[in-house]
Image (cartoon, helix red, strand yellow):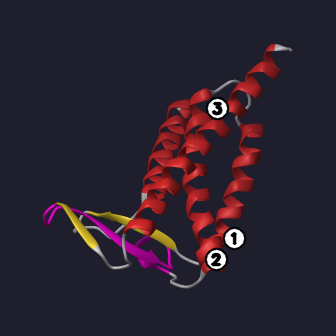
Amino acid sequence: MRRDTVGIVLNAAVFLFTIFVVLLIDQSTKGMIVNQMQPGESIPVITNIFHITYVRNPGGAFGILAYRTEIFVAMAVFFIILVSILPIYFPGRNLKMSCALGILTGGVMGNLLDRLRTGHVVDFLDFRVWPIFNAADVFIFIGAIFLFVFIIKKGG
């Protein structure tokens, strides 16, 4: 194989493996919550600071656009298509970008799976001063930060 081909295959493998790991973590944590708790139930981990609280969120961040699942599904599909063409604009062997995009995409796909399966996402991380969120949301945030830093460093 040529060196370019090896780089492309390695980037794709890192990207897909990262998505798999993120989805595994996201879906298994949500599955534990659904199987062990009732909606609305809250378990204090650190009283008044951090609780595990089972909420079914039919909207997006902060509950916006509740019950507009089709909008979130369309946005997720658009994002996944966009990510699949990004390597055209950032060619070459860049494992950091593949990892950042894999984290971000895995998070998007985790919430997309919930929405397609049930029409809502399972949220459970409750810090009492912020709306309740889930592992996929954490991965989306981390992946976006990594991607932002990568793009800023490449541009500078």
Q: Secondary structure at mark 1?
A: helix
Using residue 124 as the reference point, say whether residue 91 is left or right of it.
Answer: right
Sequence-first disc among 1 and 3: 3
For the residues labelled 1 and 3, the Cα–Cα distance comes to 26 Å
**Does dot 2 land on a helix, a strand or a loop?**
helix
Residue 106 drawn at (x, y percent): 58, 50
Is 70 contained in the magenta span? no
Q: Which residue is mark 2?
A: 71
Mark 2 belongs to which amino acid? Answer: Ile
Q: Which residues are magenta?
A: 46-64
* SS for dot 3: helix
Q: Quadrant of residue 37?
A: bottom left
Judging by the rendered image, the residue that carries numbered circle 3 is 14
- Label 3 or label 2, whichever lies nearer to me, is 3
| Image vertical order of residue 40 relative to residue 20, above or below | below
Mark nearer the viewer, 1 or 3? 3
**Residue that carries the numbered disc 1 in the rendered image:** 74
Q: Residues within 10 Å of mark 3 (few under 14, many from 20)?
A: many
Q: Quadrant of residue 70?
A: bottom right
**Residue situated in front as seen by the camera: 82 or 109:** 109
- Quadrant of residue 9 within the rendered picture: top right
Quadrant in the picture for the N terminus? top right
Q: Mark 3 and mark 2 in contact? Answer it, CB < 8 Å.
A: no
Position of residue 139 relative to residue 123, above or below, is: above
Name the residue at 63% across, 72% down: 117
Q: Residue furthest front?
A: 36
Q: Residue at x 45, y 77 (%)?
A: 56
Q: Is 93 drawn above or below residue 50 in the view shown?
A: above
Name the residue rendered at 59%, 76% in the picture.
Answer: 118
Disc 3 to disc 2, C-alpha distance = 29 Å
Image marks 2 and 1: residues in contact by CB distance under 8 Å: yes
Q: Residues within 10 Å of mark 2 (few under 14, many from 20)?
A: few
